[in-house]
Image (cartoon, helix red, strand yellow):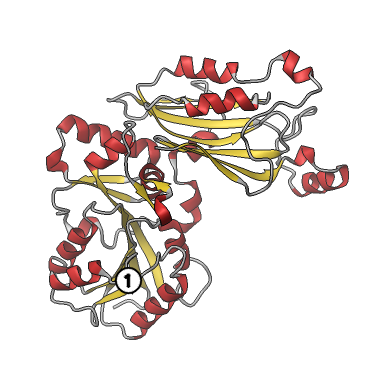
Amino acid sequence: MSDIIPVTILSGSLGAGKTTLLNNLLTGAGDRDVAVLVNDMGEVNVDAELIAEGSDLDVDGGVTELSNGCICCELQDDLETAVVRLARNREFDALIVESSGISEPAPVARLFTTESRVAALYRVDALVTVLDTRQFLDAFGGGDPERRGEEGDRPLSDLLVEQVELSNIVLLNKADLCTDAELDEAEELVGALQPDAETVRTTFSEVDPERLFDRGLFDHSRMNDLPGWKRALADDGHGHDGHHHPDEVYGVTSFTYRKRRPFHPGRFADLLESLPPSVVRSKGTAWIRDNDYRVVLGQAGPSVRIEAQAPWIASLPEVERDLYRSNRPDLEWHDEWGDRRTELVFIGTDYDETALRAALDDALVTDEEWDAEEALSGPFPAEQGAEITLREP
Protein backbone atom coordinates (compact mmCIF):
# COMPACT_ATOMS: atom_id res chain seq x y z
CA MET A 1 0.00 0.00 0.00
CA SER A 2 1.53 3.31 -1.11
CA ASP A 3 1.95 6.07 1.48
CA ILE A 4 0.37 8.64 -0.84
CA ILE A 5 -3.36 8.06 -1.20
CA PRO A 6 -5.03 8.64 -4.60
CA VAL A 7 -8.18 10.78 -4.50
CA THR A 8 -11.07 10.84 -6.96
CA ILE A 9 -13.19 13.99 -6.66
CA LEU A 10 -16.76 13.40 -7.75
CA SER A 11 -19.15 16.17 -8.75
CA GLY A 12 -22.47 16.44 -10.53
CA SER A 13 -25.85 18.09 -10.16
CA LEU A 14 -28.50 16.85 -7.78
CA GLY A 15 -30.10 13.69 -9.09
CA ALA A 16 -27.46 13.03 -11.75
CA GLY A 17 -26.52 9.66 -10.28
CA LYS A 18 -23.53 10.29 -7.99
CA THR A 19 -24.86 8.21 -5.10
CA THR A 20 -25.72 5.33 -7.41
CA LEU A 21 -22.21 5.54 -8.87
CA LEU A 22 -20.65 5.40 -5.41
CA ASN A 23 -22.63 2.34 -4.46
CA ASN A 24 -21.63 0.69 -7.74
CA LEU A 25 -17.97 1.47 -7.07
CA LEU A 26 -18.04 0.31 -3.48
CA THR A 27 -19.71 -3.00 -4.28
CA GLY A 28 -17.67 -3.59 -7.44
CA ALA A 29 -14.23 -2.44 -6.33
CA GLY A 30 -12.89 -6.00 -6.09
CA ASP A 31 -9.62 -6.16 -4.17
CA ARG A 32 -9.43 -2.38 -3.95
CA ASP A 33 -10.46 -0.95 -0.56
CA VAL A 34 -12.21 2.38 -1.07
CA ALA A 35 -13.11 5.06 1.47
CA VAL A 36 -15.80 7.63 0.71
CA LEU A 37 -16.37 11.12 2.05
CA VAL A 38 -19.79 12.51 1.16
CA ASN A 39 -21.27 15.97 1.57
CA ASP A 40 -24.90 17.07 1.64
CA MET A 41 -26.39 20.53 2.10
CA GLY A 42 -29.00 19.25 4.55
CA GLU A 43 -28.66 18.83 8.29
CA VAL A 44 -28.99 15.09 7.78
CA ASN A 45 -26.60 13.64 5.25
CA VAL A 46 -28.95 11.48 3.22
CA ASP A 47 -26.23 10.48 0.77
CA ALA A 48 -24.07 8.99 3.52
CA GLU A 49 -26.96 6.85 4.73
CA LEU A 50 -27.87 5.71 1.24
CA ILE A 51 -24.28 4.81 0.39
CA ALA A 52 -23.85 2.92 3.66
CA GLU A 53 -27.09 1.01 3.07
CA GLY A 54 -25.93 0.01 -0.39
CA SER A 55 -22.57 -1.35 0.69
CA ASP A 56 -20.86 -3.35 3.38
CA LEU A 57 -19.62 -0.12 4.97
CA ASP A 58 -21.28 2.01 7.63
CA VAL A 59 -21.22 5.73 8.25
CA ASP A 60 -18.80 5.35 11.13
CA GLY A 61 -16.49 3.09 9.14
CA GLY A 62 -15.67 3.51 5.49
CA VAL A 63 -18.15 6.33 4.78
CA THR A 64 -17.45 9.69 6.38
CA GLU A 65 -20.08 12.43 6.25
CA LEU A 66 -20.06 16.21 6.25
CA SER A 67 -23.49 17.81 6.64
CA ASN A 68 -25.21 21.17 6.45
CA GLY A 69 -22.71 22.97 4.29
CA CYS A 70 -20.75 22.93 1.05
CA ILE A 71 -17.24 21.48 1.08
CA CYS A 72 -16.04 23.95 -1.55
CA CYS A 73 -16.65 26.83 0.89
CA GLU A 74 -18.21 26.54 4.38
CA LEU A 75 -16.82 23.12 5.22
CA GLN A 76 -13.22 23.47 4.04
CA ASP A 77 -11.88 23.13 7.60
CA ASP A 78 -14.13 20.15 8.28
CA LEU A 79 -13.01 18.52 5.04
CA GLU A 80 -9.36 18.95 5.92
CA THR A 81 -9.89 17.50 9.38
CA ALA A 82 -11.86 14.55 8.00
CA VAL A 83 -9.35 13.53 5.34
CA VAL A 84 -6.40 13.83 7.73
CA ARG A 85 -8.24 11.64 10.25
CA LEU A 86 -9.00 9.12 7.52
CA ALA A 87 -5.35 8.96 6.51
CA ARG A 88 -4.22 8.41 10.10
CA ASN A 89 -6.70 5.55 10.55
CA ARG A 90 -6.03 4.29 7.08
CA GLU A 91 -7.39 0.93 6.03
CA PHE A 92 -8.08 1.76 2.39
CA ASP A 93 -6.34 2.11 -0.97
CA ALA A 94 -8.22 5.05 -2.48
CA LEU A 95 -10.46 7.90 -1.38
CA ILE A 96 -13.53 9.26 -3.18
CA VAL A 97 -14.70 12.73 -2.19
CA GLU A 98 -18.28 13.32 -3.29
CA SER A 99 -19.26 16.97 -3.20
CA SER A 100 -22.86 18.09 -2.93
CA GLY A 101 -24.86 18.86 -6.04
CA ILE A 102 -24.10 22.57 -5.72
CA SER A 103 -20.33 22.31 -5.24
CA GLU A 104 -17.56 23.29 -7.60
CA PRO A 105 -14.69 20.78 -7.91
CA ALA A 106 -11.82 23.30 -8.12
CA PRO A 107 -11.72 24.45 -4.45
CA VAL A 108 -11.90 20.85 -3.28
CA ALA A 109 -9.05 19.85 -5.59
CA ARG A 110 -6.92 22.75 -4.36
CA LEU A 111 -7.14 21.48 -0.78
CA PHE A 112 -5.28 18.35 -1.91
CA THR A 113 -2.72 20.19 -4.04
CA THR A 114 -1.65 23.24 -2.02
CA GLU A 115 1.13 23.05 0.53
CA SER A 116 -0.71 21.61 3.50
CA ARG A 117 -0.87 18.56 5.69
CA VAL A 118 -3.53 17.17 3.33
CA ALA A 119 -1.37 17.50 0.21
CA ALA A 120 1.41 15.61 1.95
CA LEU A 121 -0.88 12.62 2.42
CA TYR A 122 -2.93 12.56 -0.80
CA ARG A 123 -2.70 13.09 -4.56
CA VAL A 124 -5.64 13.92 -6.80
CA ASP A 125 -6.01 11.15 -9.37
CA ALA A 126 -8.99 12.41 -11.40
CA LEU A 127 -11.90 14.85 -11.37
CA VAL A 128 -15.08 13.01 -12.35
CA THR A 129 -18.40 14.67 -13.21
CA VAL A 130 -21.69 12.78 -13.50
CA LEU A 131 -24.25 14.38 -15.81
CA ASP A 132 -27.93 13.72 -16.20
CA THR A 133 -27.53 13.86 -19.97
CA ARG A 134 -31.07 14.99 -20.71
CA GLN A 135 -30.83 17.71 -18.06
CA PHE A 136 -27.46 18.81 -19.49
CA LEU A 137 -28.87 19.19 -22.99
CA ASP A 138 -31.99 20.95 -21.73
CA ALA A 139 -29.94 23.40 -19.65
CA PHE A 140 -28.38 24.79 -22.81
CA GLY A 141 -31.49 24.72 -24.92
CA GLY A 142 -33.13 27.73 -23.32
CA GLY A 143 -35.23 25.81 -20.78
CA ASP A 144 -33.12 25.58 -17.62
CA PRO A 145 -35.87 26.05 -15.07
CA GLU A 146 -33.72 24.81 -12.22
CA ARG A 147 -31.51 26.84 -9.92
CA ARG A 148 -28.84 25.83 -7.43
CA GLY A 149 -27.20 27.56 -4.50
CA GLU A 150 -28.26 29.53 -1.49
CA GLU A 151 -31.71 31.00 -1.98
CA GLY A 152 -31.79 29.50 -5.45
CA ASP A 153 -29.55 32.26 -6.77
CA ARG A 154 -27.49 30.18 -9.16
CA PRO A 155 -28.71 28.86 -12.52
CA LEU A 156 -28.04 25.18 -13.08
CA SER A 157 -26.27 25.93 -16.37
CA ASP A 158 -23.57 27.92 -14.52
CA LEU A 159 -22.76 25.01 -12.26
CA LEU A 160 -22.87 22.37 -15.00
CA VAL A 161 -20.40 24.36 -17.10
CA GLU A 162 -17.94 24.76 -14.23
CA GLN A 163 -18.15 21.08 -13.29
CA VAL A 164 -17.58 19.95 -16.89
CA GLU A 165 -14.81 22.47 -17.61
CA LEU A 166 -12.72 21.13 -14.71
CA SER A 167 -13.30 17.43 -15.38
CA ASN A 168 -10.98 14.69 -16.48
CA ILE A 169 -13.82 12.20 -16.93
CA VAL A 170 -17.49 12.95 -17.65
CA LEU A 171 -20.16 10.28 -17.27
CA LEU A 172 -23.11 10.87 -19.58
CA ASN A 173 -25.55 9.15 -17.28
CA LYS A 174 -29.17 8.13 -17.91
CA ALA A 175 -28.11 7.39 -21.48
CA ASP A 176 -31.08 5.08 -21.84
CA LEU A 177 -33.34 8.15 -21.78
CA CYS A 178 -31.59 9.74 -24.77
CA THR A 179 -31.30 8.93 -28.44
CA ASP A 180 -27.93 8.15 -30.00
CA ALA A 181 -28.04 11.53 -31.71
CA GLU A 182 -28.63 13.30 -28.39
CA LEU A 183 -25.75 11.42 -26.79
CA ASP A 184 -23.50 12.37 -29.70
CA GLU A 185 -24.50 16.01 -29.26
CA ALA A 186 -23.83 15.84 -25.51
CA GLU A 187 -20.39 14.37 -26.16
CA GLU A 188 -19.63 17.16 -28.58
CA LEU A 189 -20.76 19.82 -26.12
CA VAL A 190 -18.55 18.32 -23.43
CA GLY A 191 -15.66 18.28 -25.89
CA ALA A 192 -16.15 21.97 -26.65
CA LEU A 193 -16.26 22.90 -22.97
CA GLN A 194 -13.42 20.58 -21.95
CA PRO A 195 -11.37 19.23 -24.88
CA ASP A 196 -9.35 16.72 -22.80
CA ALA A 197 -12.24 15.13 -20.91
CA GLU A 198 -13.00 11.46 -21.46
CA THR A 199 -16.72 10.79 -21.89
CA VAL A 200 -18.39 7.55 -20.83
CA ARG A 201 -22.02 6.77 -21.61
CA THR A 202 -23.71 5.13 -18.63
CA THR A 203 -27.09 3.85 -17.51
CA PHE A 204 -27.75 3.73 -13.76
CA SER A 205 -24.16 4.98 -13.35
CA GLU A 206 -22.73 1.58 -14.28
CA VAL A 207 -19.09 1.90 -15.26
CA ASP A 208 -16.01 -0.30 -14.98
CA PRO A 209 -14.14 0.92 -11.86
CA GLU A 210 -10.90 0.69 -13.82
CA ARG A 211 -12.13 3.65 -15.90
CA LEU A 212 -12.14 5.82 -12.76
CA PHE A 213 -9.39 4.57 -10.44
CA ASP A 214 -5.60 4.87 -10.74
CA ARG A 215 -5.82 6.87 -13.96
CA GLY A 216 -3.34 9.62 -13.12
CA LEU A 217 -5.33 12.12 -15.20
CA PHE A 218 -5.20 15.13 -12.91
CA ASP A 219 -2.42 17.63 -13.56
CA HIS A 220 -2.44 20.43 -10.99
CA SER A 221 -0.12 22.62 -13.08
CA ARG A 222 -2.74 22.68 -15.86
CA MET A 223 -5.91 22.92 -13.77
CA ASN A 224 -6.47 26.56 -14.69
CA ASP A 225 -5.80 25.90 -18.38
CA LEU A 226 -8.35 23.12 -18.87
CA PRO A 227 -11.51 24.86 -20.12
CA GLY A 228 -12.13 25.11 -23.84
CA TRP A 229 -12.68 28.88 -23.69
CA LYS A 230 -9.21 29.42 -22.20
CA ARG A 231 -7.67 27.35 -24.98
CA ALA A 232 -9.48 29.46 -27.56
CA LEU A 233 -8.21 32.68 -25.99
CA ALA A 234 -4.68 31.27 -25.93
CA ASP A 235 -4.92 30.75 -29.68
CA ASP A 236 -3.14 33.57 -31.51
CA GLY A 237 -6.04 33.92 -33.93
CA HIS A 238 -4.13 32.69 -36.97
CA GLY A 239 -5.43 30.07 -39.37
CA HIS A 240 -9.21 30.33 -39.18
CA ASP A 241 -9.59 33.87 -37.79
CA GLY A 242 -10.15 32.53 -34.31
CA HIS A 243 -12.75 29.99 -35.47
CA HIS A 244 -12.51 26.42 -34.25
CA HIS A 245 -14.40 23.31 -35.27
CA PRO A 246 -14.19 20.36 -32.84
CA ASP A 247 -15.12 16.94 -34.17
CA GLU A 248 -18.16 18.60 -35.68
CA VAL A 249 -21.23 16.46 -36.11
CA TYR A 250 -23.93 18.57 -34.51
CA GLY A 251 -22.55 22.00 -35.35
CA VAL A 252 -20.63 22.66 -32.11
CA THR A 253 -18.13 25.39 -32.95
CA SER A 254 -16.31 28.22 -31.24
CA PHE A 255 -14.78 31.52 -32.27
CA THR A 256 -12.77 34.27 -30.61
CA TYR A 257 -13.66 37.94 -30.95
CA ARG A 258 -10.78 40.41 -30.45
CA LYS A 259 -11.00 44.18 -30.79
CA ARG A 260 -9.06 47.29 -29.76
CA ARG A 261 -12.19 49.47 -29.78
CA PRO A 262 -14.54 49.71 -26.78
CA PHE A 263 -18.15 48.63 -26.67
CA HIS A 264 -21.03 51.03 -26.24
CA PRO A 265 -22.31 50.01 -22.77
CA GLY A 266 -25.97 50.15 -23.72
CA ARG A 267 -25.77 48.33 -27.05
CA PHE A 268 -23.40 45.68 -25.70
CA ALA A 269 -25.73 44.99 -22.77
CA ASP A 270 -28.65 44.64 -25.18
CA LEU A 271 -26.63 42.16 -27.26
CA LEU A 272 -25.73 40.02 -24.24
CA GLU A 273 -29.33 39.98 -23.04
CA SER A 274 -30.47 38.72 -26.45
CA LEU A 275 -27.81 36.07 -27.14
CA PRO A 276 -29.49 33.18 -28.96
CA PRO A 277 -30.07 29.89 -27.09
CA SER A 278 -27.65 28.21 -29.51
CA VAL A 279 -24.74 30.02 -27.78
CA VAL A 280 -23.90 27.58 -25.00
CA ARG A 281 -20.93 29.35 -23.44
CA SER A 282 -19.20 32.71 -23.74
CA LYS A 283 -16.39 33.98 -21.59
CA GLY A 284 -13.72 36.65 -21.63
CA THR A 285 -12.82 40.27 -21.05
CA ALA A 286 -14.57 43.27 -22.60
CA TRP A 287 -13.46 46.87 -22.95
CA ILE A 288 -16.41 49.15 -22.18
CA ARG A 289 -16.39 52.85 -23.03
CA ASP A 290 -16.12 55.14 -19.97
CA ASN A 291 -15.25 52.23 -17.67
CA ASP A 292 -11.75 51.92 -16.19
CA TYR A 293 -12.19 48.28 -15.21
CA ARG A 294 -11.80 45.00 -17.03
CA VAL A 295 -15.35 43.78 -17.46
CA VAL A 296 -15.45 39.98 -17.37
CA LEU A 297 -18.30 38.16 -19.07
CA GLY A 298 -19.44 34.73 -17.91
CA GLN A 299 -22.36 33.25 -19.85
CA ALA A 300 -23.64 29.70 -19.56
CA GLY A 301 -26.85 28.90 -21.37
CA PRO A 302 -29.53 31.39 -20.31
CA SER A 303 -27.38 32.89 -17.54
CA VAL A 304 -25.28 36.01 -18.23
CA ARG A 305 -23.15 37.43 -15.42
CA ILE A 306 -20.75 40.37 -15.43
CA GLU A 307 -17.97 41.29 -13.00
CA ALA A 308 -15.67 44.31 -12.84
CA GLN A 309 -12.21 42.98 -12.08
CA ALA A 310 -8.88 44.82 -11.86
CA PRO A 311 -8.54 48.22 -13.52
CA TRP A 312 -6.92 48.51 -16.92
CA ILE A 313 -3.26 49.25 -16.35
CA ALA A 314 -3.54 52.03 -18.89
CA SER A 315 -6.11 53.76 -16.66
CA LEU A 316 -3.76 53.97 -13.65
CA PRO A 317 -1.70 57.03 -12.68
CA GLU A 318 1.55 57.21 -14.61
CA VAL A 319 3.80 56.06 -11.75
CA GLU A 320 1.67 52.98 -11.02
CA ARG A 321 1.25 52.26 -14.71
CA ASP A 322 5.00 52.32 -15.34
CA LEU A 323 5.62 50.10 -12.30
CA TYR A 324 3.11 47.50 -13.52
CA ARG A 325 4.60 47.54 -16.99
CA SER A 326 8.15 47.13 -15.71
CA ASN A 327 7.06 44.05 -13.75
CA ARG A 328 5.27 42.55 -16.75
CA PRO A 329 7.65 42.71 -19.72
CA ASP A 330 5.48 40.31 -21.73
CA LEU A 331 2.38 42.52 -21.43
CA GLU A 332 0.83 43.20 -24.84
CA TRP A 333 0.71 46.98 -25.05
CA HIS A 334 -0.83 49.25 -27.67
CA ASP A 335 0.88 52.62 -28.16
CA GLU A 336 -2.42 54.47 -27.82
CA TRP A 337 -4.78 52.18 -25.87
CA GLY A 338 -2.33 50.34 -23.65
CA ASP A 339 -3.69 47.01 -22.39
CA ARG A 340 -7.33 47.89 -23.13
CA ARG A 341 -8.84 45.32 -25.44
CA THR A 342 -11.72 42.88 -25.87
CA GLU A 343 -11.14 39.12 -25.99
CA LEU A 344 -14.28 36.98 -25.95
CA VAL A 345 -14.85 33.32 -26.77
CA PHE A 346 -18.22 32.01 -27.97
CA ILE A 347 -19.09 28.29 -28.01
CA GLY A 348 -22.36 27.06 -29.41
CA THR A 349 -24.36 24.76 -31.63
CA ASP A 350 -25.44 25.83 -35.10
CA TYR A 351 -25.35 29.54 -34.33
CA ASP A 352 -24.78 32.10 -37.08
CA GLU A 353 -21.21 33.23 -36.48
CA THR A 354 -21.31 35.87 -39.21
CA ALA A 355 -24.43 37.45 -37.73
CA LEU A 356 -23.04 37.33 -34.20
CA ARG A 357 -19.76 38.94 -35.28
CA ALA A 358 -21.74 41.66 -37.08
CA ALA A 359 -23.83 42.26 -33.97
CA LEU A 360 -20.68 42.56 -31.88
CA ASP A 361 -19.22 45.04 -34.37
CA ASP A 362 -22.44 47.06 -34.25
CA ALA A 363 -22.16 47.23 -30.45
CA LEU A 364 -18.77 48.96 -30.66
CA VAL A 365 -18.67 52.72 -30.26
CA THR A 366 -18.86 54.70 -33.47
CA ASP A 367 -16.31 57.36 -34.39
CA GLU A 368 -18.77 60.02 -33.28
CA GLU A 369 -19.37 58.28 -29.95
CA TRP A 370 -15.64 57.77 -29.51
CA ASP A 371 -15.01 61.52 -29.81
CA ALA A 372 -18.06 62.59 -27.79
CA GLU A 373 -17.36 64.33 -24.50
CA GLU A 374 -20.44 63.12 -22.65
CA ALA A 375 -20.24 59.77 -20.88
CA LEU A 376 -22.16 56.80 -22.27
CA SER A 377 -24.54 55.07 -19.89
CA GLY A 378 -25.08 51.37 -19.37
CA PRO A 379 -25.52 48.73 -16.66
CA PHE A 380 -21.92 47.53 -16.36
CA PRO A 381 -20.31 47.70 -12.89
CA ALA A 382 -17.55 50.27 -12.44
CA GLU A 383 -16.19 49.28 -9.03
CA GLN A 384 -13.66 46.51 -8.54
CA GLY A 385 -15.33 43.25 -7.52
CA ALA A 386 -18.84 44.45 -8.31
CA GLU A 387 -21.09 41.96 -10.13
CA ILE A 388 -24.38 42.12 -11.97
CA THR A 389 -26.68 39.60 -13.61
CA LEU A 390 -27.71 40.72 -17.07
CA ARG A 391 -29.85 37.70 -17.86
CA GLU A 392 -31.13 34.77 -15.89
CA PRO A 393 -33.60 31.93 -16.44
Q: Residue at x 41, y 54 (%)?
A: 151
Q: Is residue 294 visible?
A: yes
**Local SS, label 1:** loop
Q: Residue at x 52, y 18 (%)?
A: 357
Q: Nearer the viewer, residue 140 or 31?
A: 140
Mark 1 crowd level (few <14, some 14–19, many ≥20, 10 Å Cα): few
Q: Residue furthest front?
A: 151
Image coordinates of residue 17 in percent, x first then y, are 21, 54
| Left or right of 161 on screen, residue 309 | right
Q: Residue at x 54, y 25 (%)?
A: 270
Quadrant containing the N terminus is bottom left
> Residue 172 appears in which quarter of the rendering?
top left
Query: Which residue, given by chain and number where applicable, does mark 1 sit on?
Result: 43
Image coordinates of residue 213 in percent, x first then y, are 26, 62
Taking 350 as reference, is 108 above or below it?
below
| Left or right of 80 on screen, residue 359 | right
Amino acid type, callout 1 = Glu
Taking 154 as reference, is 134 above or below it?
above
Image coordinates of residue 285 in percent, x first then y, are 59, 36
Quadrant containing the C terminus is top left
Q: Residue at x 34, y 80 (%)?
A: 86
